[in-house]
Amino acid sequence: MTLSVIDPKQPFQAEYSQAVQDLVSFLRAGLGSNLHSVYVYGSVARKTAIPSRSNLDIIIVTQQSFGEQRSTIINTLRWRFQKSYPHISDISIKTALVSEVASLESLFSWGFLLRHCSVCVYGENLSECFGDYEPSWEIAKHWNMDVVDWLAVYRNRIVRAKEDSEILKSQRIIAKKMLRASYSLVMPKDLGWYDSPIECGKHFLRYYPEMQVEIERLVIMLQSRTIAKRSIIGVIDSYGDWLVKQFKKTEFRIG
């Protein structure tokens, strides 16, 4: 069973269509011939983005490194979008070289991300270098085995946060990660892939119904309401610890 791909012919939502066009124009002007291709992934690519809540997630592929320009280009891009598109909460940017993407070593990283989670909006579509993927532990492991590191980083950020806005941003990021990591545990059995954290939680519960309360707490953390620090830390320490142990058990069993 192969995983589905995002239909590139389906138009972007009206709130994001012009923003994507402006993004491409800006990058072409800023990077010139060094720009190879541009991709949109995440909720904007899936056409499920929520204005004022969803990020614009993009991948910039270049012929050569643009390290010296990177900070200037990204900071200018964010400044322009904050002024022109205030409903786009943030721009998340990944960068890569053509040589990094089109390689065997990138099969479960760039290959999977471009093939099944992204839409090419400019340039040569490198996703065509890869065939369709089947659900596997290799994919699940690559994308979420690092959950232990995420838990440590965001636990620390939440503890140190002084503003509600900081807590809200961190609680939502770690909730998304934990929901997606939860689904990764059952992906090889469920034979699917869901980027939506809500869907990840629903399908995970088909195999672990006893975790209903924990998943409900994570879904609450996704909402636009700041949760008390002690409650977030409690979820990270209890359910997060369970998640990490399950990944280790699965890796030992499957390898």
Image (cartoon, helix red, strand yellow):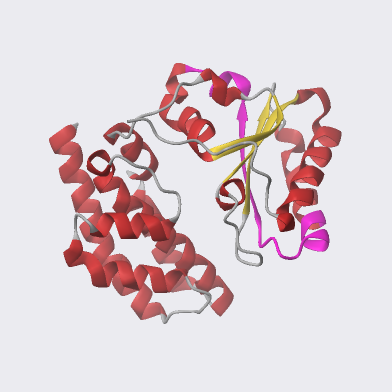
In the image, what residue occupies the spot 43% across and 26% down? 132
* Between 68 and 196, the one nearer to me in the picture: 196
Left or right, 245 with reference to 126: left
Q: Is residue 90 magenta?
A: yes
Seen at 44% across and 36% down, the residue is 4
Residue 64 in the figure: left or right of residue 176:
right
Height in image: 178 above or below 220?
Answer: above
In the image, residue 84 above or below residue 75: below
Q: Residue at x 62, y 21 (%)?
A: 98
Which corner quadrant holds the C terminus? Answer: top left
Q: Residue at x 77, y 37 (%)?
A: 69
Give the image quarter of residue 21: top right
Nearer to the camera, 52 or 245: 52
Which residue is farthest front?
A: 10
Q: Please give the range of residues in magenta.
A: 80-103
Residue 97 appearing in the image: yes
Q: In this image, 183 relative to 161: left or right? A: left
Seen as rendered, the residue at the extreme left is 253
Please count the marks in the image. Answer: 0
> Residue 251, how many percent across, how many down?
20, 38
> Would you say residue 153 is visible in this rendering?
no
Tell which of 118 and 156 is nearer to you. 118
